[in-house]
Image (cartoon, rainbow, N blue to C red):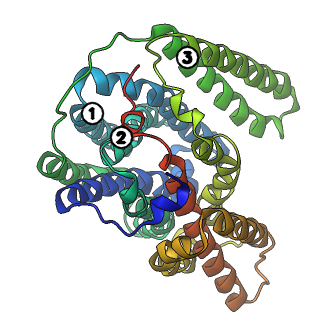
Amino acid sequence: MTVSDAASPAQPSSSSRAAVLTVAGVFFLLLLDSSILNTSLPQVARSMGVQPLALSPTITGYLLASVVAMPLSGWFSGKFGARRVYLFAIALFMLASAACGASGSLWQLIAARVLQGAAGGLMFTVGRTLALRDAPKSELLSITSLLVWPALLAPVLGPPLGGLITTYVSWRWNFLLNVPLGFVALALIARHVPPDSVVQRLPMDWPGAILTATGLALLFGGLEMTVLAASEHGRWPAAAGLVTLGGALLALAFTHLKRTPHPVISLEPLKANTFRLATASAGTYSAACVHATPYLLPLGLQLGFGLSAAAAGAMMLPYFLGNLAMKSVTSPILRRFGFRQVLLVDGVMAMGLVGGLGLLTPQTPFPLIVLVLVLAGASRSMLFTAINTMAFVDVNNAERAMPPR
């Protein structure tokens, strides 16, 4: 089976489509929470009596907790059932979101964000497992297209929604909004996502879990510290030390995962060239660029262009229109030209447009800004769908389900 086989026009059954749409809706909730906060960071800082840079741990803590929770999701799913873990993660996310909204100090907000990040890491990995575990290759493009919608829309809709909420209500409601949406998600999952038919109760790979989680936490923490080191030169040795130690632990984890009979993370998918390309090399580098754009643009429009939170959010609408316009023609283009040609051409365009966004200034004519935003959104949509479909086209159903082995 080749990559092109994933572009066949088969559609998921109505029951599986309902389950995939439910998972996509939860993804939207998760990603909306991440993006809706960006436009309110200056207001949150003023409310807490700190500088905006002091809020960096709220983002870093969320990220570190996510990457620590992700490797454990397979074992939790195997022991308790993926659907049950998914419901628990959403409930925990709702609780953490309420705690974020009620935070009275910076440290309370950081602690709540760490809890929220752990829940989010479980939600992301287990949700994708539920959507893809039984999907035949002929349905991968259709299912991936449904799952990609939240990743394309939430980072674009989040800034204008967050700007409106922050400007006219309170930044706290950016978090509190997750509570009613979470109840809706729980009800939909209970109705549309079937329980696990078989629950595998395999032993926990504690050495692999500890090495992987600690290595990822140190690596990402060190990379985050390099941002602070740019303004505080004394932090460079600590940042370099964390990155080096994290990398060393991950190398040990990789060696351990290859040898142990039941690794906390299966390395079998890496044997597929398409999975390696989409997740461990070119796909990672390109995704890093296009994913950063919806997060950096609202901040740049506020801090660099002097726009309000609501105005900066509204400026993201052309980006959303580009995403939306391209989504309807992505599958036909992939079927007509194939993944390789589309990724090469669109990858060059996407990177060039990301660079073009960095050249915009308050003096740039408004029509030109809108044009660049629309084109950047369109190229991002195509690139994201193609990479995510290619990642799983040569991975079998058992490996998509991420059981501990």
Q: Position of residue 315 (x, y in %)?
A: 57, 77
Q: Position of residue 120 (x, y in %)?
A: 40, 40
Residue on which the image places disc 2: 129
Residue on which the image places disc 3: 257
Q: Position of residue 266 (x, y in %)?
A: 49, 25
The image quadrant of residue 379 is: bottom right
Q: Nearer the viewer, mark 1 or mark 3?
A: 3
- In percent of the image, x 43 and y 14: which residue is there? 262
Q: Amino acid at mark 2?
A: Thr
Q: Secondary structure at mark 2?
A: helix
Crowding at mark 1 (Cα within 10 Å: few <14, some 14-19, many 20+): many
> In this view, which residue lies farthest toward the right?
233
On the rendered structure, is 234 left or right of 130?
right
Q: CA distance from mark 1 to mark 3?
A: 22 Å
The mark found on residue 82 in the picture is 1
Of 98 and 137, the residue lying toward us = 137
The image quadrant of residue 89 is: top left
